[in-house]
Image: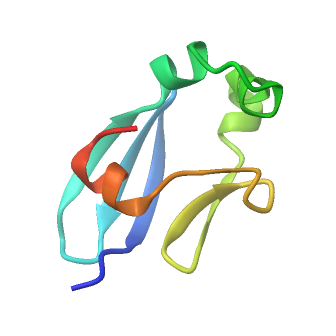
Amino acid sequence: MVISIKKAEYKGNYIIHFKFSDGKEKDVDFGIFLKNAKNPMTRKYQNEELFKNYMLKHGDIIWNDYELCFPVWDLYQGKI
């Protein structure tokens, strides 16, 4: 079975609540990842307004035309 993201809702403080194609739901905290980011293209998403500007495309969550994205399976497991 291929897992995809059906819905993503920003909860605040860099936490996104995901609903997956199999019905599983998971909150994922991106805060530590962003705080420890070394790449300037990733670090800019420490700006919460930029971070909140994600979109779902083909079952993935992306920022700025894939400038920032994560494997769906990692999000499904709650790991980034």
Residue name at image x 27 percent, y 42 percent: 78
32 and 17: which one is in front? 32
Q: How many marks?
A: 0
Quarter of the figure with residue 27: top left
The quadrant of the picture occupied by the C terminus is top left
For image coordinates 46% across by 50% down, the residue present is 9
Residue 41 placement (x, y as % from top left): 81, 33
Question: Which quadrant of the figure contains the N terminus?
Answer: bottom left
Residue 23 falls left or right of residue 14:
left
- Looking at the image, residue 76 sits to the left or right of residue 53; the answer is left
**5 up-or-down from 76: above or below:** below
Would you place residue 79 above or below residue 30 in this image? below
Q: Is residue 7 left or right of residue 55?
A: left
Q: Would residue 13 be visible to someone looking at this image?
A: no
Q: Position of residue 58 (x, y in %)?
A: 56, 80
Please name the residue shown 42% across and 65% down the image: 7
On the image, the x and y values in percent for residue 37 come to 63, 21
Residue at far top of view: 35
Q: Eyeballing the image, is 43 above or below 2?
A: above
Q: Viewed as shown, does residue 68 lie left or right of 76?
A: right
Q: For residue 11, what is the image quadrant?
A: top left
